[in-house]
Amino acid sequence: MPRLLLILALADVAIGPSLLGTFHFDDYYMLNDPIVQDPSGWWEVFRLERTRPLTYLTFWLNYQLGGENPVGYLAVNLLLHLGVVLAAWRVFPRVVTAPAALFAVGVLAVHPVQAEAINYIFARATILTTLFCLLTWRSWIDRRFDRAVLYFAFALLAKEEAAAFPLFLVGYERLYRGADASPVRKWIRPWLAMIGLCGLAAARLIYAAAVTKGAGVIYDLGDITPLNYLLTQGRAFWLYVRLVLLPVGLNFDRDFGLSRGLDLPTLAAWAAVFALLAIAAVRVRKEPAWFWVLGAFVLLLPTSSFIPLGDLVAERRVYLPLVSVALAIGVVLAKAPRPVGIVILLVGAGLSVQRSLVFGTEESLWRDTVEKSPDKVRPKLQLARALGTAEPPGREEGREERLRLLREAKQLAPSDAEVATELGVFHLQAGQPREALEQFNIAVRETNPAPSALTNWGTAQLMLGARDEAIEAFDEALSTDACQYDARNNLSYVHREGGELTKALAAATLPADCRLPIRQQQALDAARRDIAAAARIEQ
C-alpha cells in the first residue's frame, strides 16, 4: 500500500498541472452541444446517432455541476487517470512479478505520452474506456465472466476503441498463460458475448458517422481512404514506439504525411512491423513476456488499421495500448538495477509536468504546435483564433501576428475554404468588408457551400450596403440549415432595420426541431420579445 500511495502521489505531481489548463479544440464542440447543456439531456446522450454515450454522460454531469469552468472537467480527467493507475495496481501483480508490476504501474502513471489524453478534455473517452478494460481484465482473471462482460459493455459505451480487448484477452489466455490457461469451454460464451457487443458498437458507429456531418471518421475524409489510411499506420506504429521509448517532441497536431502507395518508407515500416510481430510470436512460447508486445499492437488496431480517421496520428491513441507496453517495460526494468527504474520514472514525471504546462492556455498549446508543425495549416488557424480570443483592446502586435499566421496558412492552402473564411473574418473584425468579401468569395464558390460560408458572405455584403444580396445569402444558408444561428440572427436584424417586423419575427423564430446552445437560444428569445414589443408599439 505505501508503494501504491507513492505512485499515486507521483502521478498527481506529474499530471496535477493539468488543473491549471483550459479547453482546447473539440472541447468547445462538446461545451456547445445543446444536449450537454440541457438539464434533461442526460438520457439523450444514449440516442442511436450519438457515439460514446457514457463519456458524454460524464460531460453532461460536468456541465450541470460546473458550467463552463474547465477545472471540474480536468479534475475528472485526472481522477479517472488515477483510477486507471489503481485498477492497473490490482491487475498487474496478477500477471507479472511484483517488481515488474511496480515499475509497469509507475510507467502507466507518469509517462509523458499520457499527458494529451488527460489534458485534452475531449479525450476523456480514452481514459474511461481504459479504466473499464482494466476492470474487465481483473474480472476475467477472477473468472467472474458475467461481470467482465458488463464492464466491457461500459468500455464500449465510453469509446469504441475497446473493441480489440476481447482479442487481447484471447491472446492472454492462449499465448501468455499457455499451459495454465483455462479450457476454452469455460470462457467461450462470455467471450462471444463481447464479440457480439463489438458488432453492435461497430454498427452504431457506422450509422452515427453516416448521419453526422463532419464526424471525422469513415466518411467524407477527402484523400483519406481505408487503404491509404492502413498504409500510413505502418509508419505511425513506429512513431508511437519512438514516443514511448523516447518521449520528446510531443505534438498535439503532428504534420504526418499520408501514404498513397507502397513507397519505400511505407514498405520498410510495414516490413519492420511484420518482422517485430513474427519475432514476438516465435519468442512468446519460451518467453511469455513477449506477449505484451503483441498485446500492444492488438490494442492499437481500432484506431490504427483500416478504419479511416480524420487525424492520421494522435498521441492519445497510445493511452490504452500503453497498458500492455508498460508491462513489457516493467519486465525489463525489473531486471535492471533498481535506481535505473526510479530515475526513468522521475524523468518521465518531470516531462509530464512540462507537457501539462504546455496545455495551460490555448495560445501556449497552439504556439507549441505551430513551432513543431510549421507546414501544417490547422495549427496556424487555431493559434490565430486563440490570439483573437485573448487579444486585449489596442494590442496591435497581436493582430499583426494573427494576420501573419493567416497569410502563411493561405500560402500553404490558397484554395482552402476554411483558411479563406478565417482570413475573411479577420478582415470583417478589422472593418474591411471588401477584403473580407474577396476571401468569402472563395468559400462560397465551393460546390454546396457551407451555411456558415454563405452567412459570412452575406454579412460582408451587408456591411457594403448590398442589402438584397445579404438577405438572399442568409435565406440560402437557412434553406440548407434552418438551425444556422448566425444566418437567422442576421436575417432578423436586416428585416427589423428595414421595418419589416413580421419577417423579422419569422426569422427569429426557430423551427421546432432545432436545438441551439443556451446563449444562442436566449439571444433569439430576446430578439423575438423586442420585435413583438416594437410591433405592439406601432399598432
Image (tube, rainbow, N blue to C red):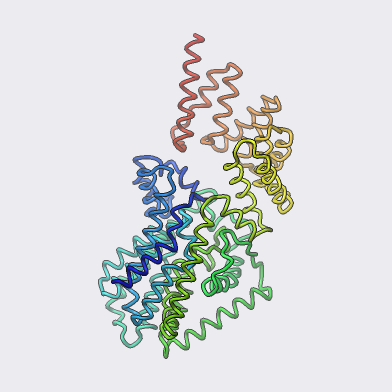
- Can you see residue 168? yes
Q: Is residue 174 above or below residue 162?
A: below
Residue placed farthest to the bottom in the image? 286
Write the residue at 42% across / 91% down.
286
Residue in front for this viewpoint, 342 or 186:
342
Question: In the picture provided, is 365 more to the left or to the right than 126?
Answer: right
Write the residue at 30% across / 73% down.
140
Question: In the picture provided, is 146 more to the left or to the right than 416?
Answer: left
> x, y (%) of residue 108?
42, 70
Write the residue at 53% across / 48% down.
213
> x, y (%) of residue 49?
43, 50
Write the residue at 34% across / 79% down.
95
Residue in front for this viewpoint, 262 or 290:
290
> x, y (%) of residue 39?
35, 40
- Can you see residue 193? no
> x, y (%) of residue 449?
64, 42
Specify the quadrant of the image occupied by residue 14.
bottom left
Residue placed farthest to the top in the image? 539
Question: In the picture provided, is 301 more to the left or to the right than 145?
Answer: right
- Image quadrant occupied by the N terminus: bottom left
Specify the quadrant of the image occupied by residue 222.
bottom right
Q: Is residue 64 above or below residue 500?
A: below
Specify the quadrant of the image occupied by residue 190.
bottom left
What is the number of callouts on the image?
0
